[in-house]
Every structure is written in C-alpha cells, then in structure tokens.
Image: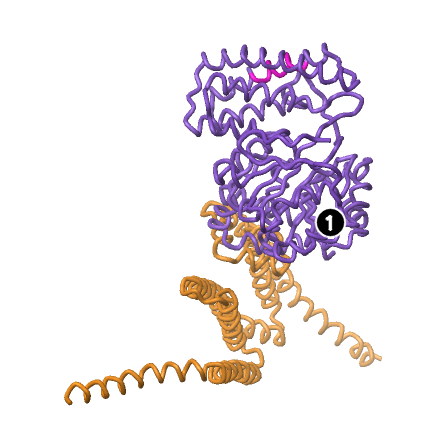
Amino acid sequence: MENFIDLILDPLNGLFLKFKVFVPNFLAMLVILFIGILIALIIKRALMKFLTAISFDSWSDRMGFTKLMRKGDLWSKPTATLGTIIFWMLIIVTLMSGLNALQIPAIDQLVSQFFSYIPRIFSAAMILIVGYLLSGFISRAVLITAANSGFHYAKLLAKAVHTLLIVLILAMIMEQLQIAPSIVLAAFSIIFGGIVIALAIAFGVGGINAARRVIEKDVMPKREEETKDEIEHI
Amino acid sequence: MSDFFQTGIITTLHQLGKPSLERLESELHEFSKVRPIALVLPSLYSEFEGPAMPGIVQELAKVKYLNEIVLVLDKASEKEFQKVREFMSPISTEIKIVHNDGKRIREIYETFTRNGFNVGERGKGRSVWLAYGYVLARGRSDVIALHDCDIVTYSRELLARLCYPVVNPNLDYVFCKGYYSRISNKMNGRVTRLLVTPLVRSLQQLVGPHNFLAFLDSFRYPLAGEFCMTTDLARVNRIPWDWGLEVGSLAEVHRNYSPRRVCQVDIAANYDHKHQVLSADDASKGLMKMTVDICKSIFRTLASEGVIFSDGLFKSLLVSYLRHAEDTIMKYEADAAINGLKFDRHEEAMAVEAFTRAIGMATQVFMENPMTTPLIPNWNRVTSAIPDIFEMLQIAVDADNKQ
C-alpha cells in the first residue's frame, strides 16, 4: 500500500520540484518582459523626438523612403513607422530574452539561433537603405544625362536601370538573410544573364546599320586619305 | 444676342448667332486627340445634395471628348465619398476623386507642411491646386478646364465653349476665362458689378495707365470660376487659397504670359449658382470676406509691379471708389429698367457701403503687412523640394479610388 502511495506521490513530488524551479524563472521572464516593454516604449518615444528634431520625415520625403512606404500602402509618418519598427524589434528581443530566462533547452537553442541571426538582419537592412539610396541616385543621374543628350526614351532607360538595381539589391538581401541562397543565386543569375543577353541581342540586331555606319566612317576617310595621298604625290 | 465689340487688351470670343453644339463637340473630339483635356471639379459634399450636381452629371455623361475628370471632394466622410463615387458612375469618362478628408490625402497635405510649404486652409484654391498637381502627375492631359459644381443652369455647351479656344491648336491661347450674364428677375453678381470694376477703374484713375489694371479691366467677368488653360500654365502658376483665387490667378497669368495669348469666352446666356450672403457686419465671412481677400490680392499684385501705396492714395481710393460705384449703380438701374428687371437701388447702395468698409479693412491689413495675401507655391517649386510628390499623390488618389 505504501508502495502504491509512493507511486502516486513521487511524480507529484517531482512535478512540484520542477514547478518550484520553474516559478522563479517564470517570474524572471515576466519582469524581463515588463522592463523590456517599458524600455522599448521609452526608446521609441525618445527616438521619435530625436527623428522629428533632425527633420527625418522631410529627409525621407526627399530621399524616396516615404514614396516606398506609400507604395506599400503605409500612410503614417516615416518617423512613426521607424519608431514602430524599432519598438517591435525591441519587443522581439525582450521576448527572446524573457524566454531564455525560462531555461528550457529547446527554447534556449531557438534564442541563440535568433541572436546569431540579428547581425544578418542588420546588414540586410543596411544593404536595403544604402542600395535604395544609390539606385535612386544612379537612376536620376541616368535620367538627367540621357535627357540632356536628347535620348528619346530617357525616362524608360532610367526606370530600367532603377529596376535592375532593385533586383540586384533584393538578391543581395535574400542572400544575406540566407533565404534559399542557392535558389536566389540561380534565379538572379538567370534573370540578370537573360537581361544582359536580351540587351546584347537587341543592340546587336538593332545596331547593325549604326555599326556599319560607324565602321564606314572610320574606314572610308582613311581610304580617301590614302587615295588623296597618292594623288598628291603624283 | 451679343455684340461683337472687342474690349480691352485680351481677345473676347462672343456668342454670335446660334452656333451648333454638335459641330463644336465634334471639332473638340478631333482636337482632343492632339491636346487631351482634363476637367477639374472642385466640390463640397453638400453640393451633391443640392439641385445643381444631378444636372451637371447628366450633362457630363453626354460629353465624349474629355480625357479625364478629376473631382476634388471636400468636407466628406468615407461613406459620403463612396456615395459620390456611385453618384458619378453614369459618366463614362475616367473619373478620379480626390478625397480631401481621406487619410491618404491628409498625409499628402502633411507632407507639404513638414517640407515648409504653406498650402493654406481648406477651400477651393487649395483643392484646385491639388487637382492640378494630380493632372500633372498623371501626365495624360495637355489642357485643364475647370468649373464650379453649384451651377444650376449648367449645360454641356458651357464646357465646350470654355475648352474650345485652348484646345484648338490653330488658336494660340493658353488661358481662357468664361463670362456670362447673371440674371434672374434681377441682376446678380454684385461683387463683380459693384466692387471689382469700380475699384479697378478707380485705381486706374489714381495710379495712371497700368498693364495689370488694363488686363483686369478687360475681363467682362473677372470673378468667373470657369476657366481653361494649358497644363504648362498650371505648372508655373501660383494661386491664392483664399477668395482672391480668381483675381490672383489672373495676376499670375498676366505675369507669365502675353495678353495676346489670353481670351475670354461667352459660355452661357444665363448663369445661376449658390449665392453668398453679404454679411455686412462681419468681415470674416460672406461677401465681405470675399471683398477683403480680393482687394488684398489686387493691392499685392500692384505693389509687386512697382505701384507705391500710401495712406493718401488709399484715402483717395475710398472716395474715388465710392464715386465710381455710385455711378455704376445708376448705369445698372437704367440697364435694369430697359430690360424689365427688378432693381433695388437701396440694396445696391447698401452693398456699396459695405464694400467701401471692406476696402478700408483691406487697405489697413495691407499697410500692416503687404505680404499677407497667401499664394500656394507652384508645382515646379514643390517637385524641386519633394521630387517624389507627384508619384505619392498619384498613389494616394489611385488607392482611394480602388477601394
């Protein structure tokens, strides 16, 4: 009978012991979450005030980030959007730290994977920002140069350059985030290679006459000069 | 039947005989292939509940030569915006509604503000300016026509005659203003008859010959809200957002183009729309507010062209205006008598007294700060500061219209 009671009590005892260990961890997680949310809110407010002070919204309007947001049907201010993004990133970090406090092996592994992934997210974000700025700058430069040279399809050319650069940036971001890297690399190579071949063929076929004229211009005057030369000597 | 006398330094296109609307429209249809036309309609939701809008929609449904219609809707909730979309559906021309109170357009206005652009308060001026921006952003039209949405006597002939001088490539006009008589059983249009014309003539008397005054005096109805112009002009013109919109727009046209390329056209035998109250005791609303704004706009334009205003000149102006206005009342009394129209001389004299007070207020405001008349920057300047604004505006309007 005693054995039987032990059989019942032992698991309960074990459960109680585990619960005794778990409760402080759980409380620690709640405290981390509370403090984390509080800090995230404070940082969000401070960041938004700072961004407003440096006229970040106006800068975004000029740099094209606001347009990017509007294309994605985001109609809040860039300051508010960035503030919200930073807030939720901090909440995710807080959540991960909180879960870490539970000291559950499976979650520990997930948390360490998450933290090792953060630098990749950061560098992807940097590639996106710098790449988008550069692509805008380059496409505008192409537009101005082509328009000033009297090129009829300047706007189309600028848009094509912009699209190509965006494709390149997206491929770089995907590669950085390690999202199906081999597929991305293959897809990018095929698309980019295809475009280059298409351009080469288009230029080659369309430019036969132009190329002939260029060659004739280069070659014919020489022949004339040679002939002239001969006549003069005679 | 109109006479054919050419007044002033701009061209006047009269309605002579009974020109065929079908011919006019078929020509417009051909011309619009080369110069596509956008119609801009600034409106309040309340106008859709009034008597004018059903007639306007019915008439516009028959118009085939328009490339696009841009309706700027003010003071409308989301539900009312949807109702307006439904209301406009009989028209086959592509219609885009700019919902001024929608979250996207509000954010567009916020974008202007944070980039240092004062686009003014809610009103026709600001709505029209935004509509120009949208037409320019789309880049599908070469000509913009505009009329109010409270015209009770609307017919599509008005639109055809308004568009024709600018759309016809053989006539080299960049700006065309409509004119008409405003008669019911009496003469309406007090601000034009008893304020603008006498004021302009008084100024001519005091300042001497002046190009802008001669230009303004050439218009038979300078306050008409119906005009048509090229998109190039819409891009470079700055417009006032207050009641000085019509006069201020004319000042900008005068500044940027030769009068040879400006015309006015008789667009309707009769015209009736929502009447404003005089509000003689309150200069912050009604015709008194309109008067103060118009006077400020005229003074500022003249000052910008080198006219020096002093206390003495303004004092003489008040007396001179009163004399001209009183003479004008007598002329109109005779005109009303021969045409069998009611004419309340006392009421007209009261209006002149109120206008004189309003001119006095405008002179005071102008002397305190000559820069008070607000002008919304032109689109060239806006796009220079915010290069993506056209795209953002287009995204906002298109998204509103897709929902």
Query: By what rule are the colours in the image chosen?
Result: by chain
Q: Is residue B399 magenta?
A: no
The answer to whether residue B335 is left or right of residue A48 is right
The answer to whether residue B222 shows anywhere in this view is: no
The answer to whether residue B403 is left or right of residue B120 is right
Location of mark 1 (residue) = B23
Locate the C terminus of chain B and report the quarter of the image it occupies.
Answer: bottom right
Mark 1 neighbour density, 10 Å: few (under 14) some (14–19) many (20 or more): few
Q: Quadrant of residue B303?
A: top left
Kind of residue at disc 1? Arg
The answer to whether residue A105 is left or right of residue B48 is left
Q: Does B319 sit above or below residue A9?
A: above
Q: Does B210 sit above or below residue B54?
A: above
A44 vs A224, nearest the viewer: A224
The answer to whether residue A142 is left or right of residue B379 is left
Query: Percent position (x, y) of residue B55?
Result: 81, 41
Query: Percent position (x, y) of residue B80?
Result: 78, 44
- Chain B drawing hue: purple
Give the letter of the chain under mark 1: B
Q: Is residue B357 magenta?
A: yes
Mark 1 secondary-structure assignment: helix
B9 vs A234, nearest the viewer: A234
- Tell me which segment is drawn in magenta: B351-359
Locate the N terminus of chain B and report the quarter of the image it occupies.
Answer: top right
Query: Percent position (x, y) of residue B373?
Result: 52, 29
- Chain A drawing hue: orange
- Residue at 57 percent across and 61 percent down: it is A89
Q: Does B357 sit above or below residue B41?
A: above
Taking the view exactly as shown, the residue that stands out farthest to the right is A1
